[in-house]
Amino acid sequence: MTGRGPTIVQLPEAQTKLHRGLFLDEVKKLVCETYRPHLIVDLTSCEEFRAETIDLLLECVEEVEHADGRVSVAATPETAVILELTQLVSVLDVFSSVSEATNAAPVSVMRPVPKIAPAQVAA
Amino acid sequence: MELGALVVTQGATLRAAGNQEVGTWSSAWPVVGKTVLERWVDRVRSMQVNMVSVVDRGVSVPNRVQKMVEWAKDGVEQILVIVMGSYADVDLSDLVQFHHEGGHTITRVFDPEGPLGISLLDRRAVLRELPSTVAAKPRPSRYDFMGYVTRLSSTVAYRKLVQDALEGRCDIRPSGFQTSDNVWIDPTAVVHPSVKIEGPCYIGADSRLHAGVTVSGYTSIEKNCEIDVGTVLECASVLPDTYIAPGLRVRNAVVDGTRFEHLDRNVTVDLGPVALSAKRNSSTREIHP
């Protein structure tokens, strides 16, 4: 298992049961191979956002969250509205482009050690 | 003195053709129970004006003028022309009195931003039977109105009028009964006991709100709508005959069937393919005991 930068994926164009299954298999494989995976789903060129697309995104989030990872989405303003409407924004981060999603990857910051007052030390 | 009124609506033909532009207000949208057009007609009728004609802006100007000429020839003394472009709390009786007392031929109504599309014409002006001493085109007099006005320009303006009506900032009063502080519910609406309503809000005739729905923040749900289980509506207007799917969070938006306009983002989305909203059949209303 390795730790690495975000992985960019695109949803299958044809959302048949077979295509959805193949896509989820790929996600599962990535989750197994990566420590705390960060998946960026590129929906910027998604022409038809359907009810099945929402289900697939949710399944994707479920898989990634099991591995303590996270899912970001790069979406058009129209798709972003649907994600907000369905409250999917509470389980994934939405960005306007893939590069914005990539740049927003969190940076670990160590917390500074709290200062101890001399009185506390004396006590 | 006999008065006729000609109300010119905006864009009904445009809407019928399905060409409504993003961010534009349609005259067919009701504001807490009635359209602005219906409210203008009600106000004209309340002045005991029986001769009221409503024409679409698509009707050519000569045809509109022809109507006024016919009325003038039939003896109508004054003709009130309202070209729908705004909602204004103008006191039409006061306008008629101003026109009459000043002996004006044409009076046009203005607010500080410009003309409101409301004019009062004497039959002399319509028939052009003016004394030879007066120029062929009489100079219109100006009636300055300083009260409440909203121009029917955008969806944002539409939402503002809904909010102002619910807040009592203008003369528009919501239809139905006021159940509590600034909450109006039509008696034919069906609201599940678990629905949370935080006023000011409006729920129109024949609408149904399912269990767990939350309504707040100047939301208006017009007639024959259905809001499915657990959906949250905040600062939204749901236009007539609209179904909204369960579990959604609708905020700062206007929903008309499958057309969803988000006001913050200035984006319009078709929710049909994602099955999140739908147009209900207006002819199949549920009958409640």
Image (spheres, rainbow, N blue to C red):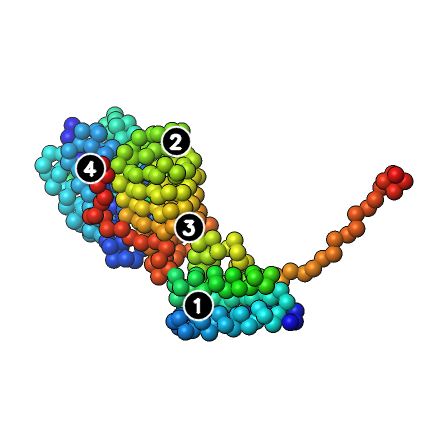
Residue under label 1: A46
For the residues labelled 3 and 4, the Cα–Cα distance comes to: 44 Å
Residue density around tag 4, few if under 14, some if 14–19, many if 20 or more, within 10 Å? many
Q: Nearer the viewer, residue B131 or B151?
A: B151
Could you tell me the amino acid type at mark 2? Asn
Q: Amino acid at mark 3?
A: Leu
Q: In the image, which is nearer the foreground, mark 3 or mark 1?
A: 3
Q: Which mark is residue B248?
A: 3
Compared to residue B179, the image places residue A91 above or below, namely below
Q: Quadrant of residue A3?
A: bottom right
At which x and y percent is residue B212?
Answer: 40, 43
Distance, label 3 to label 2, CA atoms, is: 24 Å
Please give the residue where the numbered disc 4 appears in the rendered image: B5
Disc 2: CA contacts within 10 A as few (<14), some (14-19) or many (>=20)? some
- Mark 1 to mark 2 CA distance (whole Å): 43 Å
Q: Please, what secondary structure does the residue beneath circle 2 have?
A: loop
Amino acid type, callout 1:
Cys
